Amino acid sequence: MWNKNERDGKVDQAKGKVKQAVGTLTGDDELKAEGQVDETVGKGEAAVGRIGRKAGDAIARVATVVKRGA
């Protein structure tokens, strides 16, 4: 399940791709560049979310192992 950062990152990536497509179709280089920035920011945000989720999962696994040993 995605966390907030992953979800928001995916939304920003999609928004960026749409802006790039519209910018390309209309010849609006500024909109196209804005879309590229949105997509890049979205990729970063999604990566941060994945790292956070994986760290949380690892902590939960360690806690489970510790509880079994106690």
Image (cartoon, rainbow, N blue to C red):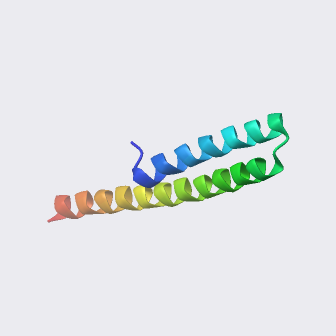
Above-or-below relation of 42 to 25 = below
Q: Is residue 47 left or right of residue 24?
A: left
- Residue located farthest toward the top when viewing the structure as drawn: 25
- Position of the C terminus by quadrant: bottom left
Nearest the viewer among 18 and 61 is 18
Above-or-below relation of 28 to 22 = below
Q: Is residue 27 left or right of residue 20?
A: right
Name the spot of residue 39 as percent of width and height, x first.
66, 50
Nearest the viewer among 70 and 1 is 1
Q: Quadrant of residue 10?
A: top right
Residue pictured at 43% horizontal, 61% vertical: 52
Total numbered labels: 0
Above-or-below relation of 67 to 16 = below
Residue pictured at 61% horizontal, 58% vertical: 41
Name the spot of residue 64 as percent of width and height, x first.
24, 57
- Position of the N terminus by quadrant: top left
Name the spot of residue 55 as percent of width and height, x first.
41, 62
Q: Is residue 51 left or right of residue 70?
A: right
Residue pictured at 54% horizontal, 58% vertical: 45
